[in-house]
Structures are given as structure tokens and as C-alpha cells.
Image (spheres, rainbow, N blue to C red):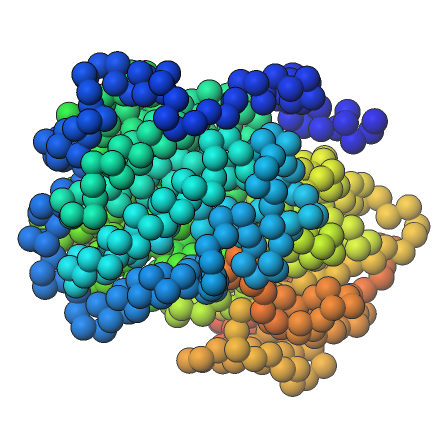
Amino acid sequence: MYKKVKILTNMGFRWSGFRLKYELEKKLGLIEKKFKPIEPSNKDLIANIELDITNILDNCKQYIESNSNKFFFNSGSLFSWGKDFFNKETSKEIVNIANNICNNKFPYFNKSIAEFQTIGWNVNPFSGKKAPLDKHWIKISDLGADFGDIKFIWELSRFSFVYSLVRAYRITSNEKYVVKFWALFESWVENNPLEIGVNYKCGQEMSFRIMAWIFGLYSFLDHKESTNQRITTLVKFIYYHTNHVDKHFEFALKSVKNNHAISEAAGMYTVGTVLPFFNKSKKWREKGKKYLEKEGLRQIYEDGSYLQHSMNYQRLVIQNYTWVLQLAKLNGDSFSEELITRLKKCVKFLYNNQDKKNGYLPNYGMNDGALIHPLSSNDYLDYRPQLNAAWHVLTRRRLYQSGLHDENLLWICGEEALNSPVEDCYRKSQDYPVGGYYTIQGEGSFGLVRCGTYKDRPNQADMLHLDLWSNGENILTDAGTFSYNTDEEWLKYFNGTSSHNTIMINNKDQMEKASRFMWLNWTKSKLISFNQYEDGMMIFEGEHYGYKPLTHRRGVIHYEGQWVIIDDVFGDFSHEKQSFSLSWLFGVRDVAKVEANEWVLETNTEKWNLSIIESPSYKDKLYKGSIEPTKGWRSLYYGEKEPVSQLNINMKENKKIRIITVLSKDNDLVKYDSKSKSLKVHNKSIVLREIGLDSMFRGVENSL
């Protein structure tokens, strides 16, 4: 009862009321009746498709060909652009991936390869476990233990492999890629009766499938394998998918309340715009547009950060809008300036927190491996292809100089976009107070600090986490996600406080876990200061209250390549010793202890030192790939985890504490005098105040 009351408090009465109503309808069988399975040959279905244009299904291919200017490109012009874009090395890679697909070897989550002897659309290819083929989707659990992580089944049915087949076809003109597209589509149709099985459970997954099908349709439209009969079947399934998404959209809008609603709105808008002959096309276009406007302005905060607090989900949203806005332009439609302005801020947020050397961002927030329109050969972790295309759609300019990342732009916006000017923008120290992000930019390195009060559902208990990057290396890293449906211990580690670069008290998370995707007692935080001085020094100071009656306050100083992190904990100790654990998770090649209070961090190109120069008495432990306890792991790609070094500084105290950590390439440039509380950073002297006062810093002066 306690958890139910807390969920009601956190999520609100509207959300709780909708969930109660939905579960009741589910139990009474009303949802199953609403989504009653039918045959694709059903006369009512055909009548709906043919309502506006007589016998459209008899001439489907001809009709779509005559309206092919509604899409990014048409198959007739597919080979007339980008002749000089694909070099030999890139072409070979693209063709190899497509050839693997032709041999039933599919990329999973942009990293792993899953091989099928026979395609199983209900099979987890890594565990061999199967979801039921004879049940209505509403009767199948998302998180059932019988078939494990449902995302390993959904991944193939997203049809993301279509983009690889099209890219290889563009390079080689080999018809085997067209043959494989239709073979896989027909296999899916045969093995996924309407409304039966797991692949109808999620409207977002269905929307991604719609986009991939339409991309394949327009790419292969003029090929002999693309017969009118095949196209007619595809059109029927697109109609049925979109109708399903429309009827179930309220669930994404009122229950899930995140990127699902935007993806589903994008799916409806796409079909309503590109395939206008359905009886519901106008409705879907208008409904999709309405909620793309409304949800974009709700989900993307005014400062450009995103309500799901996930870098990859923010990129997913950007991909949806890039696709939709370009389709709108091609079809004489447009979206509000307010939304365009918000989307620009959204792109700029990701750009400003991106490593300029490799295009990577902090591995921050929930990350399900989504890259919904994989149209470049850049690594999944490189955000340049998607941000570049988005920025061009929004401004008619590019964000980066020409490179491999331009392929995404080429497919969405055409060859002329490759010659558009490059935006003259630079990365800078920036506060994002609505989302609670504070970016500190230095020469060759940058840091991102989290300090915010949640107003939307959180996914990680990680307040005051610090991510640190230097010349393409993630010095201090976030552990990532690994899997949404795994053992409780792994979920607790990856989502909880212990895997983040912050302080954990009494081995408890900053929030209380209610379920796999829910936390109780959402963290509240306060920014104390975020100041940039004329000489380039940056100082952040903030605190959070996830461990009441204790407060964790953190100060971060960056100056002349030196990073100093000051952690204070104060409050009512009740005369009992509390346990404190300061964690540093490293994304570097090697970590070794060299002194009692010093560790060397070795990257591929440079060495850093980490020193504890002030603290109570502590015990330190360096973990790497530890099982008991679960420490020293990171997941960069969904479903995969790798051992990394994690340092824990552990102590027990019954009074307020202060810990000062220095990260530097030359620790001799940072000194601390505990008597005078004077911290010298390079040629600056910073005086610290007593622990627990209204701020940590007394003043900053030049040292002689």
C-alpha cells in the first residue's frame, strides 16, 4: 500500500486514473475486443483503403509511382545522386553488412550479430527463448521471464535492416537486396497474424516498422520484384499498423508519456502525408501533427534538455523530427516556429555535450540501443550523422565539416545539402537549469554535472554525477543501461547510485526503487552557484537531499586543465556512524594505484592522475568486473557489458565530512592546506568555508 500511495503521489491522479481504467479494460477483455484480429483480405479493411480512390489496390504501384515526389527520393532517381560520396572502404563495409543480412545475419543494437537458420520473428536469437505465437498481444507480458528481454525479439521486427539493404542497393544495383527485402516482409506477414504475438504490443515499435517499410517501398518501387500484389499487401499492413497505433495512442500519451508518443505521432503523420489515399489519411496527418507539436513542446524542456534524461532517447526524438519536418517541407506543410526553436535548442544541447574529436556523448541515461534510421557508417555512439541532418532540416546549415557523417544528410535532404554552409558555432560552458545539467568546457576536456529536481519520471538515481571527457576519452564515465529485463542485481547496479560518480550513503540509492521503471521519493536538488571567471576558471556548486536528514553538496572547479571535486556531507547524524562511499567509474584503458592516495589513469593517448588530497580516514578498493559485490562494469551497447575500473573510497563517520578529489595531468599544480582551508589551483587561491554553511566557497584570489 505504501508504494501504491507513493506512486500516486509521484505520478499524479491523471496517470493513476488512466492506468486503473486501462488495467480494468484489460481484465474485462475490452482491449482484446477493440483490437480484434482480422484477415488482411477482410472486405471492410479493403473498403477503408479504397474509400477515396476507386480500385486503388488494383493500381497501387502505379499510383505510388505517380506521387513519388512526396518522399525524400524516388527509386528512379536513387542512382543519380551521391556518385562520389561512397569511397571504396565505406562501400565495402556497407555491402558486407547487407550481404550478411542476405545470409540471415542481422546487426542487433548496432553492435552484436544475430544469426538465424530460419527467421524467427518471435525468438530471442541469443537465448533461443520464444514468445508465444498463438496469443493476443494484450495477454503477453512485456517483462515475462518465459522469453526474457522482449527487446531482443522486437529488434528484428523494427526492420532497421532495410536501411542497410537500400544503401547496398544504391552502391551496387544488385537486385538480391530487393529480393531479400520482399522475402523478409512476406515472412513477417506470414508469421505475425494481425494482433497476434509480441510484435503488436508496442505502438512505437510498429511506427518504426512503418517508417522502414515505407523507406524500402520508395527505394525499390521500380524494380520488377516490387509487384503490384506485393505492394498491395505492404499497403494493407501499413494501413493496419497505423490504425492500430491510432487506436492505442492514448496509452503512449497518458501512460508512457515519453518518446513513444512522439514516435507514434511521427508514424501517423508519415502515413497520412505520404500515402494520402486511405480513408483516415487526413485524420492521421492532422492528429500526428497536433501531437508532434504538443508533445515536442512538453517533452523538450525550454533549455533544450529532455524529460527522459537520456542522451540516446533525446537523439531518437531528434531523428523522428528530422524525418517528419523534411517530409512536411516536401509536401508543402510546416510546423510552428515555437517548435522549431525548441528543436534547435534540443540539438544544441546534444552538440554542446559532445566530444568534438569522435562525436560521442556521455553514456548518460537509459539507452536501449535505438538508432531508428541507421543511414551512415559512423559508430552508434557517434551522434554527428543525426545532429548534422537535424540541424540542416532546421536551419539549412550543417554542424560539421564534410565527412562520413554526411551520408545521413544525403539520404534525408538530397545531394544539394552536402554543399550547404557550416554553422559557425562552438561549444561553451552552459547551464541547463530546467533539466539540471551543467556543462563545463575546458581546453581539450569537458565535464557534465547533474543537479536537478525531477518533475518527470526519473530513470537513474545519480544526482551530482560527474562525467569527464578529454580528447575523445571518457575519463569518468556513466555505466549505461545494459538491459531492461535482467537480474535484479544488475538492474540495481546500472540504474542505481553505486555505478555513478557520486556519493552513496549507507549502501542505499538516492531514491527508493518501486519497480523496474519507477522510483519513489524523487530526488530534489539545489544549484548554489555556476560561475565563469574572466580568466576561464569555472566553479559549480550544488546539493541534493536524497539522503535526508543528510545533505550531499558538491563543488567542481576547472582551471587550466585541473579538475577539483569537493564533496561535503552534513546534517543530522544522530550520533551514529554512517557509511559513505565515493565512487569513480573510469572509461579509460588502465587504472593503477601508485601512492597511498594517488592513482594513474592511462588512456590511449595520455595519462591522468587522480588524488584524494583531503578526507577523513578511508579504505579504498579498486574493482574491475566484480560480481560480489557488483562493481566495475559499463554498457555502451544494449545487451552488452564490459569490465572497467571503478574506485570506491569508503569511510564511516558520525560527523560531517569533506573529501577533495583532484583529476589532473599534473597534480603538483593543486595543493590544499586543511588548517587555512586554502585550495591552490595553479596560480589561483580558493578559500573554502566551514562544511554546512550556505555555500562552500569563500572567495577566489590570484596567488603570488
Instruction: Depth check: give the residue in front, 335 or 689.
Output: 335
- Give the farthest residue toward the right: 575
Seen in the image, is 71 located left or right of residue 6?
A: left
Q: Please provide percent x and percent y for residue 621.
A: 74, 73
Taking the spot 24% from the left edge, 41% from the top edge, the residue there is 217
Instruction: Depth check: give the residue in front, 337 or 518.
Output: 518
Q: Please provide percent x and percent y for residue 245.
A: 44, 27
Q: Please provide percent x and percent y for residue 528.
A: 58, 42
Taking the image as drawn, is residue 386 in sight? no
Taking the spot 43% from the left edge, 36% from the top edge, the residue there is 206
Q: Is residue 581 above or below residue 601?
A: above
Quadrant of the image occupied by residue 550: top right
**What is the total number of numbered labels drawn onto the structure image?**
0
Q: Is residue 167 above or below residue 661?
A: above
Taking the spot 42% from the left edge, 80% from the top edge, the residue there is 605
**In the rendered image, which quarter contains the N terminus?**
top right
Seen in the image, is 203 located left or right of residue 492?
A: left
Taking the spot 25% from the left edge, 57% from the top edge, the residue there is 177
Instruction: Depth check: give the residue in front, 456 or 280.
Output: 280
Seen in the image, is 625 located left or right of residue 62?
A: right
